[in-house]
Amino acid sequence: MSSIMSRLGREPLFFDGAMGTVLQEKGLAAGEAPELWNLSHPQDIVDVHTAYLEAGADIITTNTFGANPFKCQENGMEMEKIVATGVSLARQAVQQAGYGTVALDIGPSGKLLFPMGDLQFEDAVKAFGQMTCAGVEAGADCVLIETMNDIYEVKAAALGVKENTSLPVFVTMTFDADGKLLTGGDIKAMAAVLEGLGIDAIGMNCGLGPEQMLGLIRELRACTSLPLVVNPNAGLPKERDGCTYYDVGPEEFAAYMKEILQAGAWAVGGCCGTTPEHLRQTVELCKSLRCQPLPEVYRTVVTSGSKTVEFGGKPIIIGERINPTGKSRFKQALRDNDLPFILGEGIAQQDAGAHILDVNVGLPEIDECSVMCEVVTELQSISPLPLQIDTSDPETMAAAMRIYNGKPLVNSVTAKHSSMEAIFPLVMKYGGVVIGLTITEEGIPETAQGRVDAAKLIIDTAAEYGIGRHDIIIDPLTMAVSAGQDAALVTLDALSRIRRELGVYTSLGVSNVSFGLPQRENVTSAFFLMALQAGLNAAIMNPISEPMMRAYRSFCALSGYDENCMAYIEAYSQTEAVASPVAVSEISLREAIEKGLKDKAARAAEELAKTMTGLDMIDHEIVPALDNVGRRFEAKVLFLPQLLMSADAAKAAFEVIKTHMDGQASEQSKLTIVIATVKGDVHDIGKNIVKVLLENYGFHVIDLGKDVPPEAVVETAKREKAGLVGLSALMTTTVASMRETIELLHSDVPEVKIMVGGAVLTQEYADMIGADFYGQDAMASVRYAMQLAEGL
Amino acid sequence: MLNRTEILRYIGASAGDDTLNLMIERAEKEVVAASRPRHIYKHIDIVVNGAEGRVNLAGMEIESRDLAGHLDGCTEGFLFACTLGVGVDSLVKKYSFTDLPMLPIAQAVAAAYVEYYADTVQQEIEKYAKHHSLYLRPRYSPGYGDFQLNCQRFLFDALQISKSIGVSLTDSFMMVPFKSITAVIGLSKDSKQCHINKCMTCTTKNCPFRKGSE
C-alpha cells in the first residue's frame, strides 16, 4: 500500500490550496493558461508548492489542471512536456522540504461528451490516460481528478487513469448549493458511480465555500463508505472592478474545515481563493483531530448520469419492452436500425411509470454489440432513467457497461462458473448492480432450497471477486404455472427465503408465469401481487399493461408506499373505472391525417385494412391527404407543427399497414436518398424533419446523422446507389464543409443529384457551391425528390 | 412571460390557432422544467479602433469592423454568457424521436426562453449602467457580421464558461448545450444604440428569423 493510503484515516490529511489564485498575485494574466508557467516561470511554481508544504500540506497538487491534450492543443502546448514538468516541479519542492506527496492534478476536458457534445467517450478516456502516463512517468505519487461536473466525464477520467496506473486515485466533483452537478447529477449518483469504479476517496471541490459545502458533505457521508476529500473555495465568488475575489478569511475557513472533518472528511484543503495562510491556520486547528470511522453504508443503487434508483423501499418497475423476443415489429425495427421506434418504446414506458428500462437488442442477424451501445447512448440522451443492460453476450455486456453513463443494472449472471467468470470482473471494473439468476451447471433447480443454494453460490463467489452483496439482486426465476402446478409457489418460497436468509434484494420477470394460458394478464397480475407480498423488490414487466399497473399502484397504496394515496389518485381519478370498448373511428383516414390526429388515423387504418389492401390505402387515402396538407403548408395556411402532425398521423397509418402486411415490403420508391448534416455542424433538427417527411412519401432514406465527413457521404452514396443526396448546414462557417462535400460528390459520384438546406443558405449560395437544388423548407425537398423519382 | 409573437415567428407561423397555442403552452411548461439556467458576466475595458476595424476587449485584440462599429463610443462593457443547460437539449432530442410535431415548438420556446433569461440577467448590468450614467448596447455575439465565430474561444477563456456554467465548445466553435448565448455588451455615455437591432447589423440578409426586413 502506498504511504499516503496507509496514513489516510489515521490522521487528518491536508491537501494544498489554490494554485491559480496565488499565481495571479505573481502576475498571471486573466485568461492566460497557468500551466504555461511550468515552462516559463518554474521557480514561481516551486515556490507555491513550497509555501503550501511549509503551511502543513501533506499532499500538493501539480500545476496541470488544464493540461489535457485538448486544451494543450488549443493553446499550442505540448501536453507531455507540461505535465512532466509540472510533476517534477512538485517533486523538487517535496525534495527540498523533505516531506510531502505529489498528486497529479487532472481537471475537466472542457468539452461535453457525445451524444450531447462532440467528444467521443473513448477519446476522452484516451486523453485522460495520456495525461496519466505522462504524470506517472514523471514521478507522481497519486492522482487527483477534480472539479468535475459531469458523471459521464468523470467516468471517462477514472477509466483513463485506472487503466494506466495502480496509484491511488482521488476524485472530487463540483456541486451547486442545491447539491447538483451542472449536468444535473446529484450526490447520491456521484457516490454510487465512483464507488463502482473503485476510486480510493471521493469528495467535493470548488464552486462553493466551506459553509455551503458542510451540509452537502453530511449528505455525502450518509451515502458512501469511502473516505472523503473536501477542498472548498474561500467562500462564494464575488466581484469588484471586474476581478473575482473570495472573502472567507483564513481563520473563518479553518473553523469551517474543522467542522467538515468532524462531519467525517478524512482529507481537506482548499480551492479557488485559498492561500498558504488559509492552509496554515486549518492545519494548526485541525491536525490533532481524530478521523471519524467510516460508516458502513450498503445501499443497492443504480444510476443514470442524473438520476438514482435505490432498491429496498417501494418496489421498482423495470420496463421490459425494449426486447425483440416474440415481437416481430421490434425485430423489424432492429433490422432497419429504426432508432425512433426503439427509443419510443423506452419513452412510452418512462411515461407509464417505469423506474428502470431494460435494454435487450439480441437478434442473430444484427451486430448486437454496436446496436446495444448505440441504443444505450441515445436512450440515455433523452431519458433520465437508469438502464438495465440485458445481454447474454459478455462482449456486448463489457462494451455497454463501459460506455454507460452512470452505474447500470446488469442482466445477468447465473450460478454457472463460466457466467460468473465473465460477468464479475466487469462489475468490478465498471461498477454495477448485477441480477443473479438461480441457474446452476445442472439447470434450474426445481426446489426452493435448490434456488436458495444457487443464490448463495452467486453471492459467495461475488464476494471472492470483491463484490458486496448490496451489488447483487437475486432473481429466483418465474416458471410457467401451466407446466407445473407448484411452479409459482416454488418461486415465491425461494423469493422470501432469499430475502430473509441471504439478505439480498430480489427481482422477477413476472410475465413468464402465465405462459400457455389464455388471457394471460389475469394470472400475471395476480402472481405479481403475490410476489410483491412475498417481498419482491423489483419486477421486470410491461408498465404499459394496465392490469399490471393497477396491481402495482394498489399494492403501493395498501402497503404504505404511496403517501395519502396520491399516486393512486393521480392515476385513476380522471379515468373511467371500466375502459370503454375501442370505438369505431368516427372520421375517415384521409381526414384524420389532414387534421393530424394520430390515434384516429391508426383506428381508421385498422378499419380500412379489413376491406382494402395496404397499397390502395396508401394511394387513395394517405398520399392524397399528405399532398393536401403539403399544399396548405406551401400556401402558409398551416405551419410546420401541423405538417408534422399530419406526418405523424400518416406514420401511424403506415404502422398499421406494416402489421397487416406482416413483413412484406410495402411499395417503396426506387429513389434512394442519403441525408446528412455536414462535418463541423451538430444541428440536425431540420435534417431530421426532412427525413421523416421523405419517408412518409415512401422514399428510402439513409440518414448519416450530424457532423458527417465528406468521405462518409460519398462512400454511402456510392454503395447505396443513391439518386439524391441531401445536405444540411446551419452556420455560415459550416457551409464551407458543405461545399467540400459537394465537390467530392461531383468528382466521385457525378451522377448523383444534390439538394441543400439550412438557415443560412439561399438560392445564390446553393448555386455558388454547386448544389442542384435549394430546399427552402421541408416540403420543397419532398417535391424535388418526387420530381426526380418520376424521371426514374 | 415569453413573447408569444416571437415564438410563432420562430415556428414560421404568421398567427397562432388553438392547436398551436396549446402545443406552445405545453412546451413552455416542459422547457422551463427541463432548464437549469446559469449565467456569468464580467466587467471589462473596451478600446475601439474604428479606423483599423479593431477592438480591444480586456487586453485582447479582436479584428472586426462590425464589432468596432457596434461598440463605437464605448470604453467599457461586459462579457456575458448564459445557458438553459443540457436538459433542454435532451428534451428537444426526445421530441425528435418520439413526438416530432412538438420539436419545432420546443425549439422556438427554448429560443425565446434563453433570450428572456438573458434579458432578465442583463437587468443587473443595466443597474450598473444606470448607476454610472451609462447606456447599454445590445448584446453582440461571435458569428454576427465579421465578428468571427472562433472568437468564442476568447469569451470562453475570459469567463471560464465551461467551468462556471457548463457550456462547452465543439471543434467548430458551436456551443453545447445549444440554448446558450455569449455576447459582448458595450456601455457608452450616449444612448444612440436604440435604433440598432442585432438583426440589422447581421450580414445574413436572408435569415428566416430576421426581424423587420419586410
Image (spheres, helix red, strand yellow):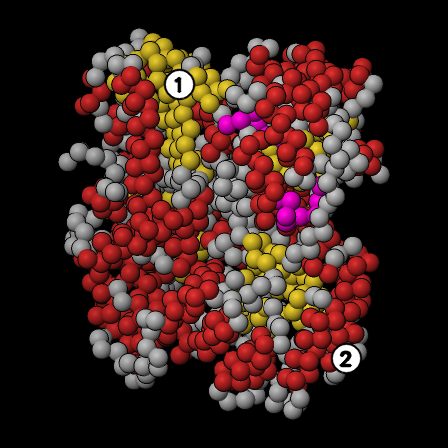
Who is closer to the viewer here, A409 or A179?
A: A179
Please identify the quarter of the rendering in which residue A37 is found.
top right
- The residue lying at 82 percent from left, 37 percent from top is A6
Who is closer to the viewer here, B110 or A14?
A: A14
Residue B5 magenta-highlighted: no
Whether residues under marks 2 and 1 lie with C-beta atoms below 8 angstroms apart, the answer is no
Q: Which chain carries label 2?
A: A
Query: Gap between marks 2 and 1, in whole Å?
Result: 72 Å
User: Do marks 2 and 1 both belong to one polypeptide chain?
Assistant: no
Residue A231 got which mark?
Answer: none
- At which x and y percent is residue B85? 43, 41
- Three-letter code, disc 2: Gln
Residue A225 magenta-highlighted: yes
Please identify the quarter of the rendering in which residue A614 is found.
bottom left
Residue A503 in the figure: left or right of residue B99: right
Please identify the quarter of the rendering in which residue B202 is found.
top left
For disc 1, the marked residue is B43
Q: Which chain carries label 1?
A: B
- At which x and y percent is residue A365? 59, 67
- The residue lying at 55 percent from left, 30 percent from top is A209
- The residue lying at 35 percent from left, 14 percent from top is B76
Quarter of the image with the N terminus of chain A is top right
For disc 2, the marked residue is A449
- The residue lying at 51 percent from left, 42 percent from top is A180
Quarter of the image with the C terminus of chain A is bottom left
- Three-letter code, disc 1: His
Segment colored magenta? A220-236
Q: Label 2: few (<14), some or many (≥20) within 10 Å? A: some
What element does badge 1 sit on? Answer: strand
The relative height of residue B63 versus residue A613 in the rendered view (above or below) is: above
Who is closer to the viewer here, A418 or A53?
A: A53
